[in-house]
Amino acid sequence: MDSKRKKKNYMMIFIMLSFIFFAALFTSQNTGYYEYGQYKKVLKTNEAISKFENEIKQNKIVEKDTYLDGKYKDYSNNVSKIGLKTSTYIEKIFTDGIKDVFTFLSKLVLSE
């Protein structure tokens, strides 16, 4: 009986974690968390547009850097770089393989 208690029920753990994840996403959607974030972005953009329009009306010199946030976030890391290199390599292999297959097939068709 002790051996049964020590065995973990992985399926039940997976279902419970899935339910918790679902509940968190469902709650965030119903409370409008995502929409509020988008609203803040729209508000910031509208303020920049109105500032731009006012400066155009006043014949001021306009530069894009004063209106754009300018923050560039680089999300790449070693894992994503390895994934990109791997997918590029796989793409090259498949492309070359397909070219070779069609070249072979065209030689078969044209030789007859």
Image (cartoon, helix red, strand yellow):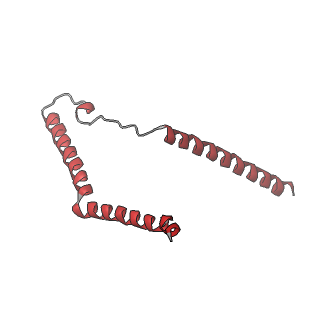
Q: Position of residue 23 (x, y in %)?
A: 32, 65
Looking at the image, residue 17 lies above or below residue 76: below
Q: Quadrant of residue 49?
A: top left
Residue 59 visible within the image: yes
Q: Nearer the viewer, residue 56 or 82?
A: 82
Count numbered badges in the picture. 0
Q: Nearer the viewer, residue 52 or 74?
A: 74
Residue shown at 36%/61% (left/top)?
21
Residue shown at 22%/54% (left/top)?
36
Residue shown at 27%/56% (left/top)?
34
Q: Nearer the viewer, residue 68 or 19?
A: 19
Determine whether, in the image, residue 23 is placed left or right of residue 104. left
Q: Residue furthest right?
A: 112
Q: Nearer the viewer, residue 35 or 95?
A: 35
Residue 8 visible within the image: no
Q: Residue furthest bottom?
A: 1
Q: Residue furthest front?
A: 2
Looking at the image, residue 96 lies above or below residue 66: below
Residue shown at 15%/30% (left/top)?
59
- Quarter containing the C terminus: bottom right
Q: Position of residue 50 (x, y in %)?
A: 16, 42
Determine whether, in the image, residue 84 is placed left or right of residue 98. left
Q: Position of residue 85 (x, y in %)?
A: 57, 40
Looking at the image, residue 31 lies above or below residue 79: below
Q: Position of residue 101 (x, y in %)?
A: 75, 52
